[in-house]
Every structure is written in structure tokens, then in C-alpha cells.
């Protein structure tokens, strides 16, 4: 997996240095055409379980706002 991240980061660095608009459009078209929206992502049993638990929490109203979550996280971090 490290090899993929390394290649991706190298490509990002190279793309950031490109000034040629046509080349950037061609790269964008290449990447867009190679990314399939119908690509199926295989989930682990654990991921499926977590998604099911999240669905149940939503149905049961067990939600917390982003602001409340950030406050909770800040308090937890400050307690350490």
C-alpha cells in the first residue's frame, strides 16, 4: 500500500507544477474516464456491522451535532 501512496504523492507533486492547461485537461479526462462509478467496494463484516449500527442509531434518534461533538472532543483532549 505504501507504494500506491508514494506514486500518488509523486503524481500530485508533478501535477501541481504543470502550467499547460491542455495537459491538465487531458490528465483530468484520463483520470475521470478510468474511475468507474459502478465500481463495487467490498466491505468487511466489521464495516457492515458498523454501518448497520449507524443506521439503527439514526432510526432511534441517537445523534449528536457537529458542534457538540467538537466540544466533547476538545474536553476529552484537554482532560489528557
Image: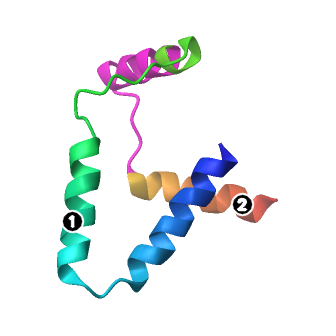
- For label 2, count other residues whose C-alpha is less than 10 Å away and answer few (under 14), some (14-19) or many (20+): few
Q: Residue furthest bottom?
A: 19
Q: Nearer the viewer, mark 1 or mark 2?
A: 1
62 lies left or right of 45: left
Q: Position of residue 37 (x, y in %)?
A: 22, 34
Quadrant for the N terminus, please: top right
Residue 61 forms part of the magenta stretch: yes
Question: Is residue 63 placed above or below 45 in the rendered structure?
Answer: below
Q: Which residue is mark 1?
A: 26
Tell me the element at label 1.
helix
Residue that appears at 25% across and 54% down = 30
Magenta segment: 49-65
Question: Is residue 5 placed above or below 43 in the rendered structure?
Answer: below
* Dot 1 or dot 2, earlier in sequence: 1
Tell me the element at label 2.
helix
Would you say the residues marked 1 and 2 are in contact, meaning their CB atoms lie under 8 Å apart? no
Q: Position of residue 63 (x, y in %)?
A: 39, 35
- For label 1, count other residues whose C-alpha is less than 10 Å away and answer few (under 14), some (14-19) or many (20+): few
Q: Residue furthest right?
A: 80
Where residue 40 sits, quadrant-wise, is top left
Q: Position of residue 20 (x, y in %)?
A: 25, 84
| Residue 77 circle label | 2
Amino acid at each position: 500500500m505504501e507504494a500506491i501512496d508514494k506514486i500518488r504523492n509523486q503524481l500530485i507533486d508533478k501535477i501541481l507544477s504543470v502550467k499547460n492547461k491542455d495537459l491538465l485537461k487531458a490528465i483530468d479526462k484520463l483520470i475521470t474516464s478510468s474511475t468507474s462509478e459502478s465500481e463495487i467496494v467490498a466491505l468487511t463484516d466489521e464495516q457492515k456491522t458498523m454501518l448497520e449500527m449507524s443506521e439503527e442509531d439514526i432510526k432511534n434518534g441517537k445523534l449528536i451535532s457537529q458542534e457538540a461533538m467538537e466540544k466533547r472532543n476538545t474536553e476529552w483532549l484537554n482532560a489528557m
